[in-house]
C-alpha cells in the first residue's frame, strides 16, 4: 500500500527531475522540486537555471528510422517538457535536434516556476528520508553526501563512471575561407561547419594529439569512461582509423576549394541560433587546457580559434540497476525512494528524461490507487526500463537507446532501414495500446480520483 498523505519530493532540477515533476503536477499533485543550484554547483555546472545541458547541445537525430527519433516520438506522446523546450529553442543542426542551451534552460525554468502545483526550492539534499515520496533525479554529478547515502542504502561501494565534454568555439574566430558549411550528403541543409584536413594535416594533428598532456583524474577512483563518450585522445590511442572512421569521418562531404573529399573532417555544430558559438562534434577531451588550445588550433580553419569553453572530464554517478531497482525504479531496500535519470544507469539526455517521465508517471498512478506496468519491451521506454532492471551482463554498464535493445521482429530482413521503421511502428502501436489499457491516466481523470 502506498501512503497517499506523504508529500512528494523530487530532488534534482535536471532533465529527469523536471520531467518527473511535471508528470505529477499535470495530474493535480503537489510537488516540491529541490535543486541545489545556485547554493552549490557541481564541477561541470554553471547556469542556475533548471535543465542545464552540460556535455552537448544535441538531442540527437530525428525520424523514426533512428532509435533517438523513436524515443522522441514516444516521449512526445507522454507529454515531455524537455521536448517541448527543445522544439521551442532549437537551432539548425541538420537531421539532429539541437538547442540553444541558455534559452532551453530558461524555457524549462520559466515553465516550472509558473506551475502552481510545483514548489521550487533551492537547497541541497544530503540524505534519504521516509517522510516523503522521494524521486532522486540528481543526475551524473550527484553531490558526494547524497551519493554516499544512496550507496549505503543500496549496499553498493561504487556509483560512478566518467564522462567528457567537448570544447566550444566562438564563431567569429573561425576561418570561413577554409571552413565550409554543409551536412553529410546534403541532408538537413548546410547546418554544420566543416574543417577539412588533407593527409599531411591529419598526420600532424594525430601525432600531436597522441603526445598531448592530459589532466590527471581528480578523484581517487579508477577511471571508467563510458564507451559512447570517450575522449578524442583515448580514441586516437586506438589508431588513426578510429578517428577517420569515427568523429573525423569525411564521408558525404566535399571540400568546395578542391572538389574532392577531404582525408578527414572535424564538424562544428552551432550552440545558438545566431551561430556565435560552435561545438566541436565528438571532441570530448581530458587534455590540459593549454594543450587543447595548442593542438586544436592545428585544425585547418581553427588556427585563430577563441574557446568559449574548453573540454573536460567529469565523474558521473549511477547505481547497479538490476541489483538495486525494481521496474518502478524504486530502490529495493528503500522502496519509498525512486531513482530517475542517468543515475539509474541510462546514458544520454533523452534517456535520462525518459526515466524521469516514467518515475513521475508511475508514482502518479500508484497515488491514484492504480497498479502501473512498464510500457511493453517492444517500445523504447520499455526496453530502457528492461535494461535498467534486468540487464543480463555480469558488469552493469550505462546504455543509450538503440534498436539492439528492442526485441527482434521475428523475420529476416535484408533492408535494415525498413526493419528499423517496422520496429518503430510496432513500438508506437504498442505504446498506444498500453495507454488505452489504462496505464496512462489523463490529467483530468486523475484529478477526479484525487478529489
Image (cartoon, grey):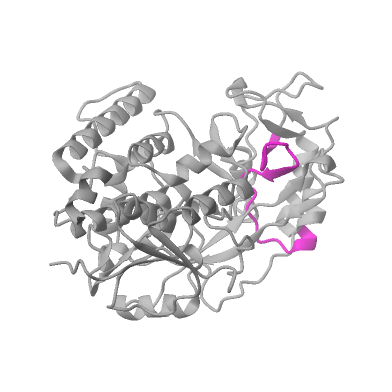
- Examine the rendered structure and indicate whether residue 194 appears above or below residue 288: above
Q: Nearer the viewer, residue 109 or 145?
A: 109
Q: Nearer the viewer, residue 186 or 135?
A: 135
Determine whether, in the image, residue 150 is placed left or right of residue 434: right
Look at the image and tell me in which quarter the C terminus lies.
bottom left
Residue lying farthest to the front in this orientation: 451
- The answer to whether residue 397 is seen in the rendering is no
**Magenta part of the chain:** 264-291
Residue lying farthest to the top in this orientation: 259
Q: Is residue 100 magenta?
A: no
- Examine the rendered structure and indicate whether residue 319 appears above or below residue 380: below
Quadrant of the rendered image containing residue 268: top right
- Label total for image: 0
Quadrant of the rendered image containing residue 202: top right
Q: Residue at 72% x, 36% y: name it.
A: 274
Whole-percent x and y of residue 323? 26, 67
Look at the image and tell me in which quarter the N terminus lies.
bottom left
Quadrant of the rendered image containing residue 251: top right
Q: Is residue 285 magenta?
A: yes
Determine whether, in the image, residue 96 is placed left or right of residue 391: right
Whole-percent x and y of residue 342? 42, 58
Whole-percent x and y of residue 389? 26, 58
- Examine the rendered structure and indicate whether residue 200 appears above or below residue 161: above
Whole-percent x and y of residue 116? 41, 56
Q: Residue at 33% x, 61% y: name it.
A: 30
- The answer to whether residue 313 is seen in the rendering is yes
Determine whether, in the image, residue 10 is placed left or right of residue 387: right
Q: Residue at 18% x, 69% y: name it.
A: 3
Q: Nearer the viewer, residue 128 or 8?
A: 8
Q: Nearer the viewer, residue 5 or 47?
A: 5
- Examine the rendered structure and indicate whether residue 241 appears above or below residue 124: above
Determine whether, in the image, residue 255 is placed left or right of residue 96: right
Amino acid at each position: 500500500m502506498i501512503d497517499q498523505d506523504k508529500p512528494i519530493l523530487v530532488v534534482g532540477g535536471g532533465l529527469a527531475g523536471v520531467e518527473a515533476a511535471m508528470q505529477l503536477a499535470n495530474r493535480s499533485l503537489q510537488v516540491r522540486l529541490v535543486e541545489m543550484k545556485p547554493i552549490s554547483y557541481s564541477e561541470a555546472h554553471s547556469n542556475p537555471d533548471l535543465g542545464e545541458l552540460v556535455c552537448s547541445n544535441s538531442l540527437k537525430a530525428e525520424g523514426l528510422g533512428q532509435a533517438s527519433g523513436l524515443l522522441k516520438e514516444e516521449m512526445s506522446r507522454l507529454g515531455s517538457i524537455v521536448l517541448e523546450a527543445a522544439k521551442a529553442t532549437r537551432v539548425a543542426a541538420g537531421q539532429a535536434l539541437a538547442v540553444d542551451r541558455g534559452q532551453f534552460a530558461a524555457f524549462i525554468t520559466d515553465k516550472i516556476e509558473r506551475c502552481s502545483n510545483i514548489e521550487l526550492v533551492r537547497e541541497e539534499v544530503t540524505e534519504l528520508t521516509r517522510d516523503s515520496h522521494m524521486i532522486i533525479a540528481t543526475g551524473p554529478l550527484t553531490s558526494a553526501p547524497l551519493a554516499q547515502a544512496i550507496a549505503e542504502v543500496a549496499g553498493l561501494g561504487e556509483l560512478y563512471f566518467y564522462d567528457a565534454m567537448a570544447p566550444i568555439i566562438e564563431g567569429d574566430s573561425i576561418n570561413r575561407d577554409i571552413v565550409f558549411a554543409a551536412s553529410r550528403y546534403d541532408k538537413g541543409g548546410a547546418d554544420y561547419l566543416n574543417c577539412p584536413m588533407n593527409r599531411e594535416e591529419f598526420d600532424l594533428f594525430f601525432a600531436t594529439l597522441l603526445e598531448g598532456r592530459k589532466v590527471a583524474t581528480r578523484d581517487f577512483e579508477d577511471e571508467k569512461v563510458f564507451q559512447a563518450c570517450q575522449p578524442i585522445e583515448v580514441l586516437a590511442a586506438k589508431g588513426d582509423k578510429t578517428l577517420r572512421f569515427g568523429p573525423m569521418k569525411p564521408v558525404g562531404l566535399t571540400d568546395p576549394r578542391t572538389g574532392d573529399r577531404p582525408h578527414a573532417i572535424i564538424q562544428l555544430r552551432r550552440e545558438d541560433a545566431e551561430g556565435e558559438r560552435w561545438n566541436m562534434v565528438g571532441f570530448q577531451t581530458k587534455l590540459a587546457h593549454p594543450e587543447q588550445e595548442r593542438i586544436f588550433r592545428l585544425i585547418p580553419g581553427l588556427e585563430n580559434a577563441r574557446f568559449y569553453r574548453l573540454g573536460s572530464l567529469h565523474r558521473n554517478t549511477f547505481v547497479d540497476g538490476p541489483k538495486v531497482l525494481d521496474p518502478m525504479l524504486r530502490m529495493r531496500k528503500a522502496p519509498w525512494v525512486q531513482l530517475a535519470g542517468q543515475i539509474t544507469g541510462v546514458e544520454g539526455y533523452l534517456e535520462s528524461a525518459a526515466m524521469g517521465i516514467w518515475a513521475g508517471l508511475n508514482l502518479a498512478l500508484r497515488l491514484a490507487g492504480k497498479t502501473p506496468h512498464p510500457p511493453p519491451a517492444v517500445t523504447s521506454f520499455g526496453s530502457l526500463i528492461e535494461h535498467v532492471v534486468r540487464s543480463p551482463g555480469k558488469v552493469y554498464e550505462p546504455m543509450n537507446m538503440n534498436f539492439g535493445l528492442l526485441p527482434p521482429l521475428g523475420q529476416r530482413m535484408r533492408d535494415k532501414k525498413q526493419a528499423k521503421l517496422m520496429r518503430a511502428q510496432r513500438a508506437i502501436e504498442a505504446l498506444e495500446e498500453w495507454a488505452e489499457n489504462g496505464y496512462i491516466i489523463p490529467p483530468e481523470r486523475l484529478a477526479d480520483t484525487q478529489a
